[in-house]
Amino acid sequence: MNETDHLKHSHFEDALALLNGTLFISLGIAMFNKAGLLTGGTAGFAFLIHYASSLSFGWAFFLLNLPFYYLAMKRMGWVFTAKTFCAVSLMAVFSSLYSYFMQFTTSNAYYAAVMGGLLIGGGFLILFRHQASLGGMNTLTLYLQHK
């Protein structure tokens, strides 16, 4: 058994991980959005675009990630790129749909920062464990980590 055997997952496990990870992250993003908070990286830039324009966070996030697929394909491979594309797409859709399923009437910024941050961090952990990311700086970070 080599050191990466324990990291191999079935396609079904990967699909569940992409679903769960992006649901966690999009709920954290919804909490940040309601509290008027920002995060870093591509998501933070998507928030700025969302706050400054009529473009939804989901669309801004999806569009900002397009250039990073080239890096992912060249450096991380097709499987990683496909999983990342799926995760980014799910994240864009889920973050746009939360207002239809859940309403935050108030949001304490401290609570949203802690709980939203925990949800986002847990979601990223799930995605990274299944060799996926949400593009942007995550792709660059995972590439550098593999080097």
Image (cartoon, rainbow, N blue to C red):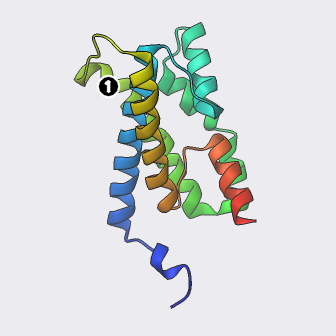
* Viewer-closest of 146 and 75: 146
Q: Taking the image as drawn, is residue 93 in sight?
A: no
In percent of width and height, residue 124 lies at: 49, 48
- Count how many numbered circles sit on residues in the image: 1
Residue 75 shown left or right of residue 25 in the figure: right
Q: Is residue 120 above or below residue 54?
A: below
Q: Which residue is mark 1?
A: 98
Question: Percent from the top left, x then y, of residue 13?
Answer: 34, 64
Question: Mark 1: few, some, or many residues within 10 Å (few <14, many ≥20)?
Answer: some
Q: In this rendering, is residue 107 above or below 126? A: above
Quarter of the rendering occupied by the C terminus: bottom right
Extreme residue toward the bottom, this view: 1
Q: Amino acid at mark 1?
A: Tyr
One can see residue 129 in this view: yes
Measured as percent of width and height from the top left, residue 5 is found at 49, 81
Drawn side of residue 59 relative to residue 44, left or right: left
**Residue 120 in picture, x, y percent from top left:** 46, 39
Residue located at (64% from left, 38% from top): 66
Q: Secondary structure at mark 1?
A: helix
Determine which quarter of the picture holds residue 12. Answer: bottom left
Above/below status of 12 relative to 16: below
Q: Residue at x 46, y 78 (%)?
A: 6
Q: Most extreme residue toward the front, as rendered?
A: 110
User: What residue sits 46% from the left and 26% below the top?
Assistant: 113
Instruction: Give the residue at x 44% y 17%.
Output: 109
Direction from residue 39 to residue 21 in the image, left or right: left
Query: In the rendered view, does 113 fall on the left or right side of 108?
Result: right
